[in-house]
Every structure is written in structure tokens, then in C-alpha cells.
């Protein structure tokens, strides 16, 4: 069964890469390598059932195709390496072609011919393995080196278990799927990112297996099939659904071009609708801002002219109200633009403590903080953080001003920084804490929702803008609050590596 499993995984991975619209040389080279593995293992599997010489020939031809394709994929995977050259690809291709003709000659009956094929393929694969180690040690750096180390570990496990064919085939199948994720999702730089995607597949596979056994238990007759058999079949179905849907969608759209979203789930359609709404908002925001600000500027200008000519104090007060409200509406428009337009942060390594100190200096100069005691607990010698200084300055100010407004009778605003160590690398944490009235539990879930506000004259965009800025920096923001005791915001940024 494990041979069929490896054959099916090989053809699924190959199909997934072949039908991808963004086919790159790396994808195509890995797809052809998986196809050769499929022919080799398929020949073994079907030869056990049908005992026909044709399947034996397919098995051997698939094995001979692996060496040149493995070298070609290795060169595409790490093009800067020096051990493997284009000449090696040509040499192994010619050698494999020559050996492929031997089974059709009198040498095909030679009892050692199959062993020669095996040792030839094994020698080339070991060469690729050692070139991978050499590249990882000498050339690779950073996240690329980590990913290659994981691949080396998988290859080592496969070599160590070769004498146990069932385990060897399962490890190779898992390794093919791991490489598929690695080359099609280069943005997943960490092992836990890759493992998370693999974990999702595992959970769905287990769920499908459990459902199958529940159906068999309630409605089936006779003994249930082995768990490993059902589990592997479920896994094959799960990883095959995506490529099969793409192929079927392309066939159906040729017949019925109007059914473009036939495979989209309601959740996908909701997300698509949200993206379209966001795009529409992004396009409309500048136009609306322009149409509002033009008459608003005229109103404010006229009010200022009239104020200079006003004869009574009451008239001047009324005109001041017009000017103040015009300024407030202008600020609302500015916040709306900040939320609607796309962010393109100018990321540069910055000392986070200096940004906080600059923001606090602005706060202390404002009359709002007259009754507030601002306490800074900044950890010294923090590593630099890749951020846009102006945008993070805006985030600190927005959250701090909200905290000050939550303490109308005075209180303590505490801003703390710290260094966070983890397996994935260092990070810098920022906490902003107030001693105000806190946030109600039902409101806490919506504080980052655009246009949600509990203030009489609030717009509800400040925290939504803060969340978007931090996410665009690859950071995280969360909040905890206890009614009557206060609120604390936690912000985390990854450091420069």
C-alpha cells in the first residue's frame, strides 16, 4: 500500500505543479522528477498485480530517468552551488539513455542489470545529497539555510530507513509534499509556518478518516478496513482535491465560461466580497475627501472672514464653533483616508525606544495629559526593529491618546518595552497600559472594527488604522482589559536578522 501511496503522491504533486499558472523552472524540474518517481513506483506496484514484463520496463525506465532529473532539480533549487554543473545533467542524461536501451538487447537478460541501474541511481542521488549539504554549509544563509537543513534532515531519515521499505516510501512521500510547500510558498520562511500547513492537512485527513469509520460503524456490514489504509486513502483524497478542482474548472470554463466561481465556497465568496469592498473604498476615498474638503475649506475661510467683521461676542463664538467643527470634520476625513488608502511602509532598522520617547514628548506638550502621569519603563540595548518610524509614531500616539481620554479624572499611563526571545528569533514587545475605567467585554471584541466607537464625538477609525499599520509591518497587536481597573495593549515586532 505504501508503494501506491508514494506513486499517488508523486503524480498529485506533479499535476499540482504542472497546472499552476505561475510555472517556474524550479516547479517544472520538480514536477518532472516526481513524474519519474511515479513511473518507477507505479511499475513496481502494477508489476506485483499483473506480472507483465511491460511494467518491469516502466519501473526501470522511471528509475533511469531519476538521476538527470534529480541533478536538474538540485541546480534549480540552489543555482549558486558549484558541485553540480549543466555538464553533469547532460552526462547523466546520455548515460541514462544508453542504459535504457539495454533491456531491449540481449543484455536485458543479465541478472546484474537491475543492480547496475539501482547503484547508478543511488550514486547520483547521494551526489545530490552531498551537494545539498555543501551548499547549506558554505553558500546558504538565513532562512534559506534553515529550510535546507530541514530538507537535509528528511533526506537523512530516508537514507537511514531504506532497509525498511514501507517506512522509506512513506518518508519519501512526506518529503515530496514538504518540498512542494517549500517551493510553492517561499514566503513561509519558518519551519512552524510550513508545519502549520502540514498540520492542517493532517487534521483534515484525521477528520475524514474518523467520518469514514463512523459511517462504517453505523451502516457497514462486516469487518472495517485497517486504519492505516483508510488514513492513507483520506490523505490522497485531501491533497488531490485542489489539483483536480483546477483541472475540472478549466474544462468546465471552456464549455460554460460564465461559471467562474463554481468551486468557491461561501466563505471564499464572502472574503472576495470584502476585498472588492475594500478596493472600492480605496478608490472612492480620495474622490470623497476632495469633494468634502473643497466646500469645507470655503466654509472655514468664510467663517474666519466673518469673524474678523463680527460686531458682538456672541457672533464671534458662533463663528468659532463653525471653524472648530470644520477642523474636526477635516480630521475625520484625514482618518478616513488613512484607513482607506493602502499602506506602503518604508521599513528601516529603527531603535524602538527612541520612537516612543519622541511620541511621549508630543503627549507631554498636549494639555490632555495635564492630569496624567506618564511612566516609561524602556529596556535598554534593544535590537533594532525594521519599521516605518512615522507610522509607528502614529500608532503609539493613537493608543496613548485613547488611554489618556479613558482617564478623565487622572491616572497613570505606563509604556514598557522588552526583549522577547523565542525559537524563531528575537522580538521586541511594547505594552501601553492605563488605569482608566477599562473596556466592556462586549465592546472588546469590536475595538479594531472600523467605525466602531463608544465616544460621543469619535469616528472609530483610530485603532483600526493602528491594527492595519502593525499587520503591514508583520507585527501583532492584542488587548486585555478589566472594567474598573484599566486596559493594556500589547504590540510585538520581529527584530532585524
Image (spheres, rainbow, N blue to C red):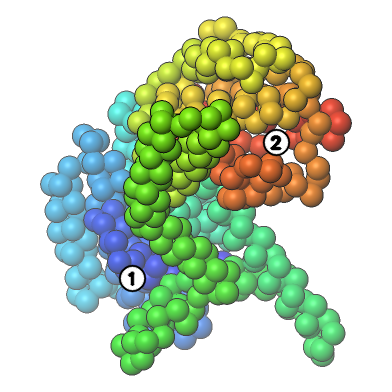
Residue at the disc numbered 2: 479
- Which residue, given by chain and number where applicable, does mark 1 sit on? 19
Which circle, 2 or 1, is nearer the viewer? 2
Apparent side of residue 204 relative to residue 44 in the rendered image (left or right): right
- Choose the circle earlier in sequence order: 2 or 1: 1
Look at 69% across and 28% down and name the residue there. Answer: 405
On residue 34, the disc is none
Mark 2 in CB contact with mark 1 (< 8 angstroms): no
Q: Residue at x 18, y 64 (%)?
A: 97
Looking at the image, residue 421 lies above or below residue 244: above
Crowd tier of the residue under label 2, counting other residues whose Cα lies within 10 Å: few below 14, some 14–19, many 20 or above: some
Query: Which residue is rendered at x = 62% and y = 27% of the image?
Result: 401
**Residue 238 point in image, percent of width and height:** 56, 70
Q: As displayed, is residue 24 above or below residue 391?
A: below
- What residue is drawn where x is 65% and y is 31%? 402
In this view, the residue farthest toward the top is 380
Quadrant where the image shows the C terminus: top left
**Where residue 454 sits in the image (x, y, percent)?**
71, 44
Q: From this viewpoint, which residue is outermost toward the bottom? A: 255
Quarter the N terminus occupies: bottom right
Residue 88 is situated, as x and y percent measured from the top left of the image, at: 18, 47
Q: Secondary structure at mark 1?
A: loop
Looking at this view, is 399 or 312 the one in front?
312
Residue 286 in view in this figure = no
Query: Quick check: 420 left or right of 144?
Result: right
* Picture quadrant where residue 106 is located: bottom left
Residue 254: % across, % down: 31, 88
Q: Is residue 406 visible?
A: yes
Q: CA distance from mark 2 to mark 1?
A: 43 Å
In front of the other: 351 or 448: 448
Question: Splitting the image into 4 quarters, where does residue 256 fall?
Answer: bottom left
Judging from the image, what secondary structure is the residue with disc 2 in? strand
Amino acid at each position: 500500500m505504501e508503494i501506491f501511496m508514494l506513486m499517488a503522491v508523486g503524480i498529485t504533486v506533479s499535476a499540482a505543479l504542472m497546472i499552476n499558472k505561475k510555472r517556474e523552472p524550479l516547479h517544472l524540474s520538480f514536477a518532472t522528477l516526481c513524474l519519474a518517481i511515479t513511473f518507477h513506483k507505479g511499475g513496481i506496484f502494477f508489476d506485483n498485480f499483473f506480472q507483465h514484463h511491460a511494467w518491469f520496463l516502466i519501473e526501470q525506465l522511471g528509475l533511469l530517468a531519476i538521476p538527470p532529473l534529480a541533478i536538474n532539480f538540485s541546480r534549480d533549487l540552489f543555482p549558486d552551488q558549484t558541485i553540480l554543473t549543466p555538464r553533469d545533467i547532460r552526462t547523466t542524461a546520455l548515460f541514462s539513455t544508453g542504459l535504457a536501451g539495454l533491456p531491449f538487447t540481449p543484455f536485458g537478460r543479465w541478472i546484474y542489470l537491475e543492480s547496475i541501474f539501482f547503484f547508478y541511481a543511488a550514486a547520483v542521488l547521494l551526489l545530490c545529497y552531498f551537494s545539498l549539504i555543501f551548499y547549506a554549509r558554505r553558500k546558504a544563509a538565513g532562512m534559506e539555510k534553515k529550510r535546507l537543513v530541514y530538507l537535509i534532515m528528511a533526506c537523512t531519515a530516508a537514507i537511514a530507513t531504506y532497509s525498511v521499505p514501507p517506512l522509506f516510501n512513506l518518508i519519501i512521500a512526506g518529503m515530496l509534499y514538504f518540498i512542494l510547500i517549500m517551493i510553492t510558498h517561499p514566503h513561509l520562511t519558518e519551519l512552524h509556518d510550513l508545519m502549520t500547513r502540514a498540520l492542517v492537512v493532517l487534521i483534515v485527513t484525521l477528520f475524514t478518516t474518523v467520518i469514514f469509520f463512523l459511517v462504517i460503524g453505523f451502516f457497514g456490514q462486516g469487518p472495517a478496513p485497517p486504519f492505516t489504509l483508510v488514513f492513507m486513502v483520506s490523505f490522497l483524497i485531501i491533497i488531490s482535491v485542489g489539483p483536480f478542482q483546477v483541472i475540472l474548472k478549466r474544462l468546465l470554463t471552456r464549455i460554460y465560461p460564465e461559471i467562474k466561481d463554481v468551486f468557491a465556497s461561501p466563505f471564499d465568496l464572502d472574503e472576495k466580497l470584502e476585498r472588492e469592498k475594500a478596493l472600492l473604498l480605496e478608490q472612492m476615498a480620495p474622490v470623497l475627501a476632495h469633494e468634502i474638503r473643497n466646500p469645507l475649506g470655503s466654509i472655514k475661510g468664510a467663517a474666519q472672514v466673518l469673524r474678523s467683521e463680527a460686531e458682538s461676542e456672541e457672533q464671534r463664538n458662533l463663528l468659532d464653533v463653525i471653524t472648530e467643527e470644520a477642523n474636526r470634520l477635516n480630521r475625520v476625513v484625514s482618518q478616513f483616508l488613512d484607513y482607506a488608502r493602502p499602506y506602503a511602509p518604508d521599513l528601516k532598522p529603527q531603535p524602538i525606544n527612541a520612537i516612543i520617547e519622541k511620541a511621549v514628548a508630543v503627549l507631554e506638550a498636549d494639555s490632555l495629559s495635564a492630569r496624567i502621569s506618564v511612566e516609561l519603563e524602556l529596556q535598554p540595548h534593544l535590537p533594532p526593529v525594521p519599521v516605518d518610524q512615522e507610522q509607528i509614531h502614529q500608532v503609539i500616539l493613537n493608543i496613548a491618546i485613547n488611554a489618556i481620554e479613558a482617564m478623565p479624572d487622572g491616572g497613570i499611563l505606563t509604556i514598557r518595552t522588552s526583549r522577547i526571545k523565542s525559537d524563531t528569533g528575537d522580538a521586541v514587545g511594547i505594552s501601553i497600559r492605563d488605569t482608566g475605567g477599562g473596556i466592556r467585554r462586549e465592546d472588546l471584541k469590536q475595538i479594531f472594527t472600523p467605525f466602531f466607537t463608544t465616544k460621543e464625538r469619535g469616528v472609530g477609525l483610530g485603532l483600526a488604522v493602528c491594527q492595519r499599520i502593525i499587520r503591514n509591518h508583520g507585527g501583532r497587536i492584542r488587548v486585555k482589559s478589566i472594567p474598573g481597573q484599566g486596559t493594556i495593549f500589547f504590540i510585538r515586532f520581529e527584530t532585524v536578522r
